[in-house]
Image (cartoon, rainbow, N blue to C red):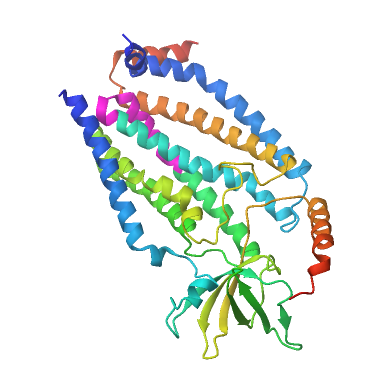
Amino acid sequence: MTPRRRRLFWVLGIVAGVGIAGALALRAFQQNVMFYFDPSRIAAGEVKPGQRFRLGGMVEQGSVSRTPGSLEVRFVVTDFKHQVAVRYDNVLPDLFREGAGVVAHGRLDASGTFVADEVLAKHDEKYMPPEVARSLQAGKSAAAAPSGEAR
Amino acid sequence: MAWVWFHRFGSPPHFYRLATRLTPWFAWPAALLCLAGLIGGLVLAPPDYQQGDGFRIIYVHAPAAWLSLMVYVVMATSAAVGLIWRMTVAYAVSASCAVIGASFTALALATGMLWGRPMWGTYWEWDPRLTSELLLLFLYLGYLGLRNSIDDVGRADRASAVLAIVGVVNVPIIHYSVIWWNSLHQAPSVMKFGRPTMPAAMLVPLLLMLAGFTAYFVALLLIRARGELLRRERNAHWTAEAAGATATG
């Protein structure tokens, strides 16, 4: 084996070794790397009572209600399998919308309501001009209208 | 032999001449592509349906973030080539990458924070994508710090090359962080399989900016690598000739 080839194997060995170590470490810390829990994980009991965590999912359509005369807002976060009710008492970010992604930081209270002290809007990777969005919306609500009141 | 081109490429005077000749072929396209991309992105592209005009920061943020990864791959690859073939030119290229890469990383982080405040509601969140990108900045700074702390060029080359090679595992982690884990940062719109989730009027300026940033990086790298080679080979015969050629020509 020439010295050059030996150095080549050394470099490949370092990359492979660090890569495998990194992959194993990330697998082991999967729970801690997880930025937020979705409602299904909460329903499965993965969150201990009183633990502070982040809740992520979609704001359910038509679930946002505000208490008049205060900042308090209530909404439901869903992953289309399970739901979690959220209460928040502060200013919401610009991109907070019904049907859009959201990440809230806080804890569950005794009644199972998630009391948030921070709400962040999670943007998706879709970009489009406003006219396109309007016509898409019009098409969708026309299609959904007959069954829209079922819930 | 098939390897002749490779060894020719590794000869400092040859590389120096090649780099001098190639620089304008990247610098001018870089300026034109960025100009076209900025006009397309800031003037011609329609606003986004949710973010309004705020989305236009993507035309700086996404190319900077893309380059922050690409520069690292170039830096680590040339460091590995230098380590394996003991090639001065490869080490010079690797050393020239670090400042450029650190600048792109800092730009990506800064523009992302400015966008995050109004859109997400926070400047910073310890999200996998943001954290791994910050780690990339520290890798670049660590590489620079390590080089600067060792006076002997040969030892600095070898030590920093190992650091660069070890850090390369972070590159796929940054790219896939938004796919592997729940993350606040959105998934890629362009750099993925399947169709980009963006109309052509928004996408074309973004691709122009990507090409422009890449050409800018190559031009900058060629200029910096020339300086690095002159500094390393200041006692060699060809350096005086090269300096004389630029002085008279």
**Main secondary structure along the magenta-highlighted residues:** helix
Tell me what residue is drawn at x 50 percent, y 16 percent. Answer: B21
Count of labels shown?
0
- In this view, which residue lies farthest toward the left? A1
Q: Would you place residue A140 above or below residue A105 in this image?
A: above
Quadrant containing the N terminus of chain B is top left
Report if residue B88 lies within the magenta region: yes
Tell me where residue A2 sits by quadrant: top left
Is residue B18 part of the magenta span, yes or no?
no
The stretch of residues the image draws in magenta is B82-101
Residue B182, given in percent of the width and then of the height, sits at 50, 62
Residue ID at (63%, 30%): B31
Q: Quadrant of residue B151?
A: top left
Instruction: Please give left or right for residue B39 compared with residue A125 in the image.
Output: right
Furthest toward the bottom, the residue is A110
Measuring from the top left, give residue B16's x and y in whole percent: 41, 18
Side (left or right) of B165 relative to A114: left
Q: Position of residue A122 (x, y in %)?
A: 61, 63
Residue B92: quarter of image: top left
Q: Is residue B189 left or right of residue B236?
A: right
**Residue B9, above or below B202:** above
The answer to whether residue B156 is visible is no
Q: Is residue B168 visible?
A: yes
The residue most toward the top is B1
Percent of width and height locating residue B180:
46, 55
Comparing B238 with A85, the one in front is: A85
Q: Residue at x 61, y 80 (%)?
A: A86
Q: Nearer the viewer, residue A87 or B136?
A: A87
Q: Nearer the viewer, residue B223 or A138?
A: A138
